[in-house]
Image (cartoon, rainbow, N blue to C red):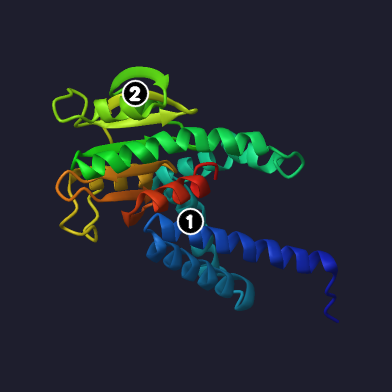
Amino acid sequence: MFDFAIIDAIDIFLVALMLYYTYRFMRDSKSLNVFIGILVFIIIWLFVSRVLEMRLLGDILDKLVGVGSLAILILFQDEIRKFLNNLGGQNRIKNFLKIFSSESKKEKTDREYVMPIVMACQNMSRARMGALIVIERNSNLDNIIMTGDTIDANINQRLIENIFFKNSPLHDGAMIISKQRIKAAGCILPVSHDLDIPRELGLRHRAAMGMSQESDAICIVVSEETGRISAAINGNFRLRLSAENLESLLAEEIDK
């Protein structure tokens, strides 16, 4: 007789949850087809080994699973590193602790440093001044900061606009904001080579997309050609943002 206990229901629920988050992770990293292929292979392996009990083919698939696990670690090392980095990020721990403590003061300080960024982007948009701003969240960006010139200053609207002024030597690179401070400017970002990025979007947008694919940072772009404000988060663009849209987006995303 089949005995189904509560622990079995919990086991099934946890496996389903693990598969769901793995699916989301693979979808965001543009590796959904690989995930589906791995899932199909696992189903075939379980069917041959457990249901049909075919020993020879089952042993061959067992060996392939052992080697395949190592191959997956090598193939997805960047994605796995990003996942573990996000999982152990300090901000996630802080967000978890917010359940047990009220931190209304923190929301005020967040708005105090969000508004200079929004106002600077609005002014640069009107002046058709190109800009690329990266806001660090859980993923550590020290390796990106090292590619630019260290500033380590308070977030200030005039400072942001002066850095991206057309005659400034730092205006072509990216500005990195970390721990509510402007850490560096003139930084070099990884450029995305995705073919689905619209052609009208330039190199700044591709750099923003590349940074958002390799980290959980918020990347803000002001187009020099059109003056439009865009943002790239987790490999997705938010295009044609108004100042109000940008403020709402930063308030919502900045502590995730």
Residue drawn at (57%, 63%) of the image:
19
Q: Amino acid at mark 1?
A: Phe
User: From this viewpoint, is residue 165 visible?
Assistant: yes
- Do the CB atoms of the residues marked 2 and 1 lie less than 8 Å apart? no
86 with respect to 212 (left or right): right
Residue at which label 2 appears = 184
Compare marks 2 and 1 and give the one earlier in the sequence: 1
Label 1: element kind:
helix
Residue drawn at (44%, 62%) of the image:
35
In the image, residue 96 lies at what x, y percent?
A: 68, 43
Question: What is the quadrant of residue 92 in the picture?
Answer: top right
In the image, residue 2 lies at what x, y percent?
A: 82, 79
Q: Which mark is residue 25?
A: 1
Question: What is the quadrant of residue 104 in the picture?
Answer: top right
In the image, residue 82 lies at what x, y percent?
A: 46, 42
Q: Is residue 107 above or below residue 71?
A: above
